[in-house]
Amino acid sequence: MRFIDNKEKLYKYAVYLILIIGILIRIVGITDMPNALNCDEASAGYEAFSLLNYGIDRNGNHNPSFLVAWGSGQNALLTYLIIPLIKIFGLKTIAIRLPMAILGCVSLVILYLLLRKISNKKLAIIGLAFFAICPWHIMKSRWGLESNLFPDLILIFAYMLIKGIEDKNKILYYLSFVVAGISAYAYGTSYYFLPVFLIPLLIILIKQKKITIKQAILSIVIVGIVSLPVILYVVINTLNLEQINLPFLTVPKLKVNRYKELTSIFSGEFLKTSTNNLMHGLKILIFQYDGLPWNSIMPFGTMYLFSTFFTIIGIIDSFRKNKKAEVKYNYLFNIWFIVSIILTCICDPNINRINIIMIPIIYYTIIGIYLIVNNRKKVAIGIVILYTISFGLFISKYFKQDCDTYGTFASDLQEVMEYAKDIASEPNKKVYITNKINYIFVLYYTQFDTNDYVKTVDYEDEYVEFRQVNSFGNYYLQSIDEIKNEENNAYVIRKEDLEKYQINQEEFKITEFEKYVVIENK
């Protein structure tokens, strides 16, 4: 009996240790790594700042169900999660990244509890350990890309659904569909995924007499009600209807319909495009890399390259009749996987666009590892050592990345933008900013008045997917061909470009920052 008690204690301590490691690696230093801010992070943050302080987004919409943002839209859920954190921390990196980090930490617990519910303790702790050190999940948890909320929300839905059914807890069961409805605000792929995933899942649950037809219908109704503003957004932009403006909500009409832009289903060469997308998606899944270093870094990939071996074993076992791994509700992950593969056909895939497939892939990998190590102590020790070394090497490389070298990230802008803000506040001043700096960073770091932005913004072309901003307020964003010696002009350029302008330092005041310089008339 004492031996059993000691074994139980060791198991608990191991679970706590793994959780601590997983949580720390997802949340410690999130403002420092990634060491640059992504333009989508800045966009979500500025929209949250605008809604909090001015009641509108940067396109003048009040409480939008979907953000117009760049022109072709941005999902709104992360922005709304950021709002209370801006109230606490101000418009800072911590406020933007904390929701994703917290959700990533919660997901560790959820996956463990889910595996305990549907299988055994050994599989659950293997799953927790693998998930805790999974490069994809670590990387996505440390920065604020709004689409990366989606897979974790569906994971939470799956746990609440199964626990609600198993514990005969109807409240928890129906709340799971509230979570499913909320996930529609996280990423556009949910518009396809949710109906194609939920309907067959509910049919199977009815056939197995785990739920009634009445419960299934009510479940769909709940998802429909919760996600109604998003459904209206899709209808309006697909059928070219008018924008809905209510006192408490805006359902926006986009200048460019991203709903069509992101998918190939409306393409004239649908079959050819879908086949190419599928092949590209499978290549990404097998080689665990999409060429975007903010999604995965080589030679580790999304889950460590050698894990593909375990993934294949897990897939084979999960789809055959006589399964070696005894897991209840295995079909939920199989449906999830199949629907995700279909989704890969209708979008131009990269890791964040097909992120919904990652949880079932991780599930299959866990099954594969379990089948290989179960009752094989020496093999288990070898695999633990292999993953521990790989995790250490991954962390070492990850925290040495310079994200400022990635095109959509930027660092060292806060001080220079605050300096430019002081200049722009003077009467008749014009601040010319190199177009190497995305306009969203100017809005973000200067905390520009949203009402003034809506009134003064000038777009190069309003009817494109990603609108280029020529100017707003006293800021002018353009390619700077020459530095003019005019009293009211100031220029913000990259430090590396300074020499090409051949500036006479007797005529100009040059203020240097880490990577930028501000040039003013003396």
Image (cartoon, rainbow, N blue to C red):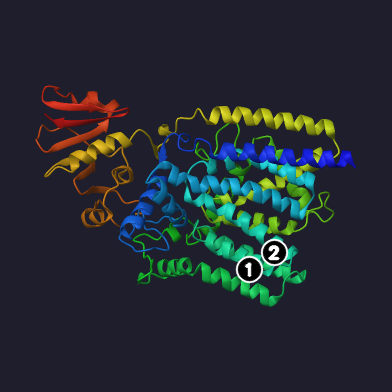
Disc 1 or 2, which lies upstream in sequence?
Answer: 2
Q: Pick whichever, 10 or 289, lies toward us.
A: 10
Q: Is residue 169 left or right of residue 512?
A: right
Q: Pick whichever, 522 or 407, lies toward us.
A: 522
At x 53% / y 36%, what residue is drawn? Answer: 28
Split into 4 quadrants, where in the image is the N terminus?
top right
Look at the picture and state if 458 lies above or below 130: below
Give x and y (percent) for residue 161.
67, 62
Taking the view exactly as shown, the residue that stands out farthest to the right is 1
Can residue 303 be seen from the camera position used here?
Answer: no
Can residue 293 be seen from the camera position used here?
Answer: yes
Find residue 174 and name its label: 1
Q: Pick whichever, 320 or 451, lies toward us.
A: 451
Distance from the alpha carbon under mark 1 to that under mark 2: 8 Å
Q: Is residue 18 left or right of residue 511?
A: right
Residue highlighted by disc 2: 164
Disc 1 residue crowd, few under 14, some 14–19, many 20+, Cα 10 Å: many
